[in-house]
Image (cartoon, rainbow, N blue to C red):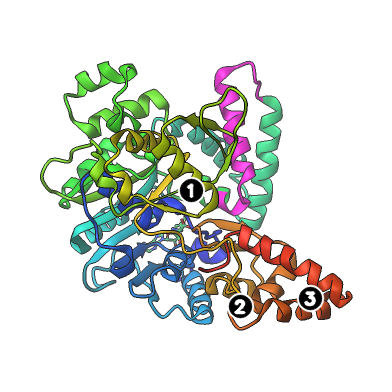
Amino acid sequence: MPTIYDRVRYPNWPNTRTHPARTGALAQLLGRKCAPFTRCRVLEIACSEGVNIASMAVGAPNSEFIGIDIAESAIARGAETIRSARLDNLKLRLADIRDEQAVEGEFDYIIAHGVYSWVAADVRAALLAMIGKKLSANGLAFISYNVFPGCRVRETIRDYLRYALRDIADPQERMAAARSALEYQMSGWSDDKPFQKALIEAAENNLERPIEVLFHDEMGEVWEPQFLTDVCAAARAQGLEYLADAHPSVLNDGLFPSVRFDAARKQTGGDWVKFEQLLDFTDMRPFRWSLFCRKAEKIERIATPDRVVGLYASADLTAAPGPGKKAFAFREKSGVEFETDDEKLGGLLDGLTREPAVQLDDYAAFPEAVEALLRLYVNSAVTLSTQPPIFTLTPAEKPLASPLARAQARRGEAVLAALNHKPVRMEDPFWNVFLQQLDGTHTHEDLAQFLLAQAGKTIEEARRMMPDALREVAGNRLLMR
Ligand SMILES: C[S@@+](CC[C@H](N)C(=O)[O-])C[C@H]1O[C@@H](n2cnc3c(N)ncnc32)[C@H](O)[C@@H]1O
């Protein structure tokens, strides 16, 4: 039976936080060793068109990936992309979460992103039961959901939209009306009144995203933000233990206990779930990316330096030396700057200004450098993963672009899955055509000849254009190592 997701297509993009190489690294820091991403089984529940799981599958040809979803059109579209990309290690299946026979065997990584808060209680229970049954002994499950109290502001937006659009049934009309209804209220709310200011920010945030996301996420039939403690209790009943939030910043107070939350720590007596729940009230967090593992011995939230062995660090850094600064100074993509005199840390970060990733094995013997690195990690300036990125910034003699991005481009998609597991927008149809040439069989001279034919330029002009075009593709993390 067609669902609302068949009537209005949901923008389906890769999401870095769900990637097993990232979540596996976080688990390793907390002392849990998961299956290597390059040889594992991954299940994505409610995968929509499967772009997220397909983008993972590109990087692990010897692992097995399965995605399920109830929306027929999404599965059909995804299956076509996968065929076109020749991703033989990925299967998408049309299945209901409530179907106990939906998938066979166990999985090392299970992902359920953007579904738990948007389905009825029986589906939520079935989802946790499926994970409880299917997660392997060292497995890691990722479940994201809206949470209270942060969602109270968004709840007001939802209440308002449901009221304003109560007489409109057609999805296209609802989307158009939602935009103008929000714009109308935003002009009435005042920046001087704290709650109204929060509503303005929430509405702006809604309008920045594709309108289809607002349609499904805020205006959907079911919209049930959770409390962390309730989700953890329901998961525990299925033999699952809360490990951490997949957003490293939430781990900050675990790895580096701060004076600010001394009282909260005392009040919750070492119960990490209760502690994080208390912090949700403090921070008014609206969303969670929870990681669960099998119930096991006590989880120790301390990252000893040896736990970085086998991990890779990456970051978008440039060197930013200057008078009066320490020996090593850097600027992160967001503009944040940091500096150090520590030779080991400085050398590591310097490596990251040139290479997509640096292996951390040699750093385990340098606790101060590891501690500083982990501080950058929980502040989102550095990412950690169990395998290095699969993109290159240096085009090969015969450049090869991601097979998934090429398949998406063949379908005329403007948002492609980049090899850093992020969406990248390439609006100009030129890129859709150019990417098809990057199949690993064409030399730079072939590509110049192609540009010559395309753009009607002289061969000299085409030869000058070609490196720029390749740089753009590489800069968007679309070229494979
Ligand atoms: C908000 S979308 C999220 C899709 C995707 N995970 C993402 O983040 O882009 C929710 C998805 O859940 C799927 N879904 C809802 N109920 C389901 C059920 N009972 N069984 C399987 N999939 C379901 C929908 O079809 C839709 O694709």
Residue 139 in the image: state x and y as whole percent: 23, 58
Is residue 97 something one can see in this rendering?
no
| Magenta region, residue range | 189-213
Which image quarter has ligand 1?
bottom left
Q: Which residue is mark 3?
A: 451
Find out whether residue 191 is within the magenta segment.
yes
Majority secondary structure in the magenta region: helix
Find out whether residue 358 is within the magenta segment.
no
The residue at 42%/63% (across/down) is: 47
Residue 247 in the image: state x and y as whole percent: 39, 42
Q: Amino acid at mark 3?
A: Leu
Q: Which residue is mark 2?
A: 398
Task: In this rendered view, identify the residue nearer to me: 338 or 282.
Answer: 338
User: Alpha-carbon neighbours of circle 3 within 10 Å: few (<14), some, or many (≥20)?
Assistant: many
The residue at 29%/68% (across/down) is: 41
Judge depth for marks 3 and 1 and give the one in front.
1
Comes first in the chain, label 1 or label 2: 1
Task: In this rendered view, identify the residue nearer to me: 86 or 26.
Answer: 26
